[in-house]
């Protein structure tokens, strides 16, 4: 066996249906007495109800979280943090809200209780992406890692399938890239394969009109594993392309990840045979790329880049941006390679 380096994150994780009721107790565990609850405008009612349930421990609610963590939103939240003498954060929502909590923690080092309600996985990672002037920049620092995470599968029951499906495949994309990460190790390889299997099984059950509680819980479990992979090992071309498209063209993060994963995995197919074998095992197929494409077709709200409103000129610009800085990928990537992946996704052809 080859040697490896493995670092475990220090996050305290409660995974339990109904776990939301433990939020107050978890704040006590963190010795937080004046928490600020964060949410998007769409989840403001639930965030307010959560704040009420925590009584005196809560100093207020900020419901302005937005996708890709715009710096001006963080500035507005910071004004409330200072005015209300906040001593801890409760991020209630998807990756956008968790991102806002991280951005505030980056500036203040306040403790965070993260209560995710999508499958994005950000709550497990020391990574923060922030957007300013149309550019998304990412940094990694333990300062932004939440202290405690409550995964309550019941919180995902309200996710409409057009958000749930892409969000789950967004998580799966973390696990796919973890399989061929340069610093992969036996623990993350196990987690990644189990995560792909769980999400692969769950996706059909996320898409119907009828609530499938088991599928929701299994997708959340897979998302947790995917988040731990994202936290532990480096990501490659898939994440670079998706961050470029998301940050510079303001496209929906999960929708882009969901659409792109079959195309970026296909690009790496011959350079990551063990990863392909793991995906095939996890999805119970002989054709890993076909399996990913079929999963995307089941889950995606937008099945080609055209439907995001992008033009072929945008694709050329995205290709330029995506290769601005060198990064590891199992197969060396040129600008034209990126353009080719994007053109394939533009048409939505089977890779
Ligand atoms: P999101 O947080 O914007 O949520 C999408 C929409 O779903 C929002 O309108 C939200 O209000 C709504 N929503 C969330 N949970 C809901 C629920 N249970 N019921 C009904 N509606 C609900 O999107 P996302 O895909 O979760 O997160 C994307 C963001 O997370 C991006 O900014 C991305 O960069 C970031 N992210 C960061 C990391 C990291 O490690 N730093 C990892 C993954 C994602």
Image (tube, rainbow, N blue to C red):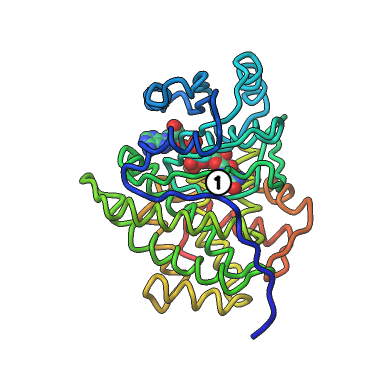
Residue nearer the viewer, 60 or 345? 60
**Residue named by callout 1:** 122
* Residue plotted at (68% across, 68% down): 183
Tell whether 65 sits left or right of 155: right
Crowd rating for badge 1 (residues with CA inside 10 Å; few <14, some 14–19, many 20+) = many
- Residue 205 in the image: state x and y as whole percent: 28, 54
* Residue plotted at (65% across, 30% down): 104
* Residue plotted at (52% across, 19% down): 59
Q: In which quadrant is the N terminus drawn?
A: bottom right
- Residue 65 in the image: state x and y as whole percent: 54, 28
Taking 184 as reference, is 319 above or below it?
above
**Looking at the rendering, which quadrant does residue 77 occupy?**
top right
Residue nearer the viewer, 331 or 345? 331
Residue nearer the viewer, 238 or 307? 238
**Looking at the rendering, which quadrant does residue 270 occupy?**
bottom right
Q: Of helix, strand and loop, which one carries label 1?
A: helix
Tell whether 70 sits left or right of 49: right
* Number of on-image labels: 1
* Residue plotted at (46% across, 39% down): 115
Tell whether 330 sits left or right of 117: right
Taking 13 as reference, is 178 above or below it?
below
Tell whether 195 sits left or right of 234: left
Query: Does mark 1's beta carbon lie closer than 8 Å to ligand 1?
Result: yes
Q: Is residue 310 in view?
A: no
- Residue 349 in the image: state x and y as whole percent: 47, 60
- Determine the residue located farthest toward the left in the rendered image: 210
- Residue 309 in the image: state x and y as whole percent: 52, 38
């Amino acid at each position: 066996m080859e040697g490896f380096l493995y670092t475990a994150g220090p996050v305290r994780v409660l995974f339990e249906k109904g776990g939301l009721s433990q939020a107050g107790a978890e704040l006590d565990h963190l010795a937080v007495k004046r928490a600020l609850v964060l949410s998007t405008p769409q989840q403001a009612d639930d965030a307010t109800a959560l704040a009420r349930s925590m009584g005196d421990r809560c100093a207020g609610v900020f419901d302005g979280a937005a996708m890709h963590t715009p710096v001006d939103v963080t500035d507005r939240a910071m004004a409330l943090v200072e005015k209300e003498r906040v001593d801890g954060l409760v991020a209630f929502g998807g990756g956008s809200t968790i991102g806002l909590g991280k951005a505030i923690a980056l500036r203040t080092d306040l403790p965070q209780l993260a209560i995710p309600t999508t499958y994005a996985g950000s709550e497990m990672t020391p990574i923060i992406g922030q957007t300013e002037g149309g550019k998304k920049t990412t940094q990694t620092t333990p300062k932004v890692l939440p202290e405690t995470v409550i995964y309550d599968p019941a919180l995902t029951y309200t996710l409409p399938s057009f958000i749930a499906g892409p969000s789950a495949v967004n998580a799966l994309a973390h696990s796919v890239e973890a399989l061929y990460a340069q610093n992969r190790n036996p623990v993350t390889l196990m987690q990644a394969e189990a995560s792909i299997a769980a999400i692969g099984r769950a996706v059909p059950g996320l898409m119907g009109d009828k609530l499938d509680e088991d599928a929701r819980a299994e997708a959340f479990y897979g998302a947790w594993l995917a988040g731990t992979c994202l936290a532990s090992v480096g990501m490659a071309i898939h994440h670079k392309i998706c961050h470029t498209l998301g940050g510079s063209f303001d496209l929906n993060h999960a929708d882009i990840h969901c659409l792109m994963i079959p195309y970026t995995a296909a690009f790496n197919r011959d350079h990551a045979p063990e990863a392909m074998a793991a995906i095939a095992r996890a999805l119970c197929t002989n054709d890993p790329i076909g399996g990913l494409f079929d999963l995307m077709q089941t889950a995606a709200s937008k099945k080609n880049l055209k439907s995001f409103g992008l033009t072929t000129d945008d694709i050329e610009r995205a290709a330029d941006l995506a290769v601005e800085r060198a990064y590891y990928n199992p197969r060396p990537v040129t600008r034209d390679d990126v353009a080719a992946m994007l053109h394939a996704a533009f048409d939505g052809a089977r890779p």
